[in-house]
Image (cartoon, coloured by chain):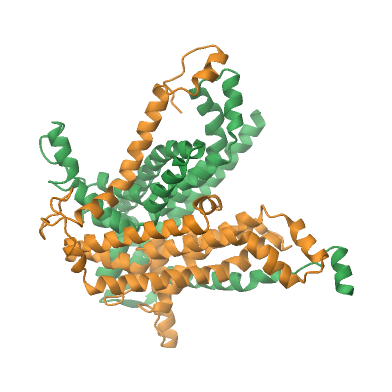
Chain colours: A green, B orange
Amino acid sequence: MSSRFSAMAGPAPARWDYLLVPSFAVSFILLAASQLTFLKGSLYADLGLGSLAANASAGNYATLLTDEFYLNALLLTLKVSALATIFTLLMGFPVAYVIARMRSRWAMLLLAGVVVSSFVTIVIKVYGIIVIFSADGGFNKLMMALGLLDQPYTIIGNQTGVVIGLMQFTLGFGVLLLYSVVRTIPVSLEEAAMVHGAGRARVFWRVILPLSLPGIIVGALMIFNMCMGAFTSASLLGGGRVFTLPVLIQRAVIIETKYGMGAALAAVLLVAVIVINLVSVYLVKRLSAARLVIA
Amino acid sequence: MNPNNAPLAPPASRVARWRRPSVGAIAKYAWVTWAYLFLLAPMVVVLGSSLDGTTAYSGVVFPPQELTLKWYRQIPASHYNALGLSLVLGLSVAIGACLLGIPAALGVVRGKLPGKSMFLAFFRAPMQIPAVVTGVAFLKLYYAFGDATGLYLNATFAGLYLGHLFVATPYVIGTVVSVLQRFNLRLEEAAMSMGASRWSTFRRVTLPTIMPGVHAGALYAFMVSFSDVPIAMFLTAPGFLTYPVELFFGIETDFNPSVLASASLVILFSLGLLLLVQRVIGLDTVVHSRS
């Protein structure tokens, strides 16, 4: 009885905080243990056949930072990831916008297409890309029949192929992300702007884009991070000629069993991603603060 | 949407014109069609060429010239084994991610601890680490752990499970947090003032309300595990491969149409799963509870 009355007076403070403990402990142990061991491992030179030097040194990093090959790999990884992110946003935003503003049952069907694409593993989609762009595949047959190409064009083994592969990996996910961003903008704002005489282009630049910009930036960073960590597209569509950092890491660890070098490469990739994320977050904060001052 | 379509006209007529298909609208739908072609063509091609009877081992034909199911009968046993491993792994990762993620989300949103956004950022960290780095990091961890204790977790189910749990849990936390933030606390207060115990309030009021977020998070967790290559690549070994990794090696070593047939089965499985999701919890629930 007494507990009932105390509940009526307002529920006794439940200690929800305790619920955090097990999850936090597991996540913290996995995060700290895995990151620390691999960062420590990156300090040991490889002696061949998977064995590592007994003493720690900065030798792996000295090799990485002086060898142009690795520097170019880092730049190439940044380049293809940035291109794939930009093209994913350019291609995905109109699609997300159209679905979000659709009022018919078609919206569900279009959404289903996007979800299926983001569910199916990228390796299967890479098989499809290889078939489409093979010398006697659909793309080249169509282009030659239309007279747009006189000899088969291939994307296998060059950066175009890698960017297309990365976009296959991120586009479905990107559309879902941008869809939820557009859904947060009330249609009434667009209608109000139009009633007051704004053209569609003006509505886009002055209403839709500014309101969805924070969401687009968050989405862009997630897509960029996905690209930076992916090696399937670069490995299978690069045809052994496009060496991004993830490809080099996979080769170093799986094929050459150079665990020290692989870990050092992974550390460079991790630091690059963290720096880019922090700088972007900082710039966005500065940007929105500046806008507040102007307004 | 279309910057080229901004003729000057009086406002009233502009509102009327807005509903009529214009050059801008046509360009918009052409763009969407092109995006869908890009998005779905690879899967359609895989499905189509798996049915082609003229396909030789050297080349793949699309569209199919002569329909056959013979490649489906030739799917190697290793693919079924890998598929079985991926399904069991994905399901157990989804369950584990819920067991870890739901309490974490409740603790972050309901708890009185300072620095909630710090906790959220911490729980999101695995999503920001490049997948290939996570793979290498767990491999190194298992070697170090094995050297210290004699128990090597690389190429074991437990090792693979922990790696996937690490990256999948943030999805459940994200979706449940976003549902909880919209949750009306008064519902719980009402239940308790009617005499419900704290546990039965949780089971009868809180849990049903956050269920859409749980479903969505579990689905994402399953798909993250089921489609992952960069992490599983480092934590598996020949004879113990997940389906995407098996397929990854298959592309280089034994590319033949039976691989396309097994890939088609996975595409059909994904479609079936999607239909099930749409029936049971609704696709919009899944998409909306993404944080």
Q: Residue at x 58, y 41 (%)?
A: A184
Q: Residue at x 51, y 54 (%)?
A: B282
**B254, B30: nearer the viewer:** B30
Q: State which quadrant residue B132 falls in.
A: bottom left
The x and y percentages for residue A217 are 50, 43
Q: Is residue A53 above or below residue A72?
A: below
The x and y percentages for residue B231 are 38, 66
The x and y percentages for residue A149 are 14, 34
Q: Is residue A182 above or below residue B56?
A: above
How many marks the image carries: the answer is: 0
- Residue A231 shown left or right of residue B1 in the figure: left
- Residue B29 shown left or right of residue A97 in the figure: left
**B113, A106: nearer the viewer:** A106
**A62, A242: nearer the viewer:** A242
Residue B235 seen in render: no
Q: Is residue A8 above or below residue B149?
A: above
Residue A18 seen in render: yes
- Residue B71 shown left or right of residue A192 in the figure: left
Residue at the extreme bottom: B150
Q: Residue at x 49, y 24 (%)?
A: B19
The x and y percentages for residue A27 are 55, 69
Q: Is residue B27 above or below residue A151?
A: above
